[in-house]
Image: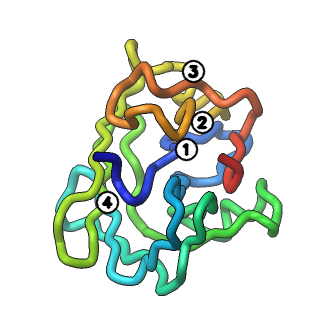
Amino acid sequence: GPSELLISEIQYHAADATDSGDWIEVHNPGTNAVNLNGWILRDADDTHAFALPNQLLQPGASLVLCEEGSKFRLYHAVTVPVAGSFDFGLNNSGDTLRLYRPIGTLALAITYDDVAPWPAQADGTGYTLQLISKQSDPTLPASWRVSPNLGGNPGQF
């Protein structure tokens, strides 16, 4: 079945002129709050691990995980809820994002790329990858589109 958490937006290669750093949006698609305490974000490298904050993510709510919070804040409103910094960058030419539950099991793994069938416009142009809907399978390239807005829509899914 679907994961308790979705990754709903990915900024893996920001534009040089508006470098917000790398970030991802985590979304709770369910009807129950999810306690993020003990959840871990990793990329393809097992040594890269970021502990999600000890907080409840309410149903329908999103949280942005930032590579560097201060960079992110230069370009995005303070109303966007963020956690960071995760201190490892996402690979500009493709990487794997993994969310692990507190008990250590893998909840979600998404391997994105910067070439077709993934939307290549998300690679350094200032646009992000956005999951099309909560019903979309986030592991499939066809489930993703380029953000309509430069800089993406962090915190709004």
Residue 129 visible? The answer is no
Residue annotated with mark 4: 99
2 and 1 marks in contact (CB < 8 Å): yes
Q: Compare marks 3 and 4 and give the one earlier in the sequence.
A: 4
Q: Is residue 150 above or below residue 114?
A: below
Image location of residue 36, percent across then percent down: 43, 76
Can you tell which of label 3 and label 4 is closer to the viewer? Answer: 4
Q: Compare marks 1 and 4 and give the one earlier in the sequence.
A: 1
Q: Is residue 119 left or right of residue 113?
A: right
Residue placed at 43% from the left, 19% from the top? 142
Residue 93 visible? The answer is yes
Cα separation, mark 4 vs mark 2, equals 19 Å
Q: Are there few (<14), some (14-19), or many (20+) residues within 10 Å of tag 1?
A: many
- Which residue sits furthest top? 116
Cα separation, mark 3 vs mark 1, equals 14 Å
Q: Compare marks 2 and 3 and give the one earlier in the sequence.
A: 3
Which disc is residue 128 wearing? 2
Q: Compare marks 4 and 2 and give the one earlier in the sequence.
A: 4
Which disc is residue 121 wearing? 3
Can you tell which of label 3 and label 1 is closer to the viewer? Answer: 1
Residue annotated with mark 1: 9
Q: Amino acid at mark 1?
A: Glu
Image location of residue 72, percent across then percent down: 67, 60
Q: Amino acid at mark 4?
A: Leu
Can you tell which of label 2 and label 1 is closer to the viewer? Answer: 1
Cα separation, mark 2 vs mark 1, equals 7 Å
Q: Amino acid at mark 2?
A: Thr
User: In terms of image quadrants, where is residue 66?
Assistant: bottom right
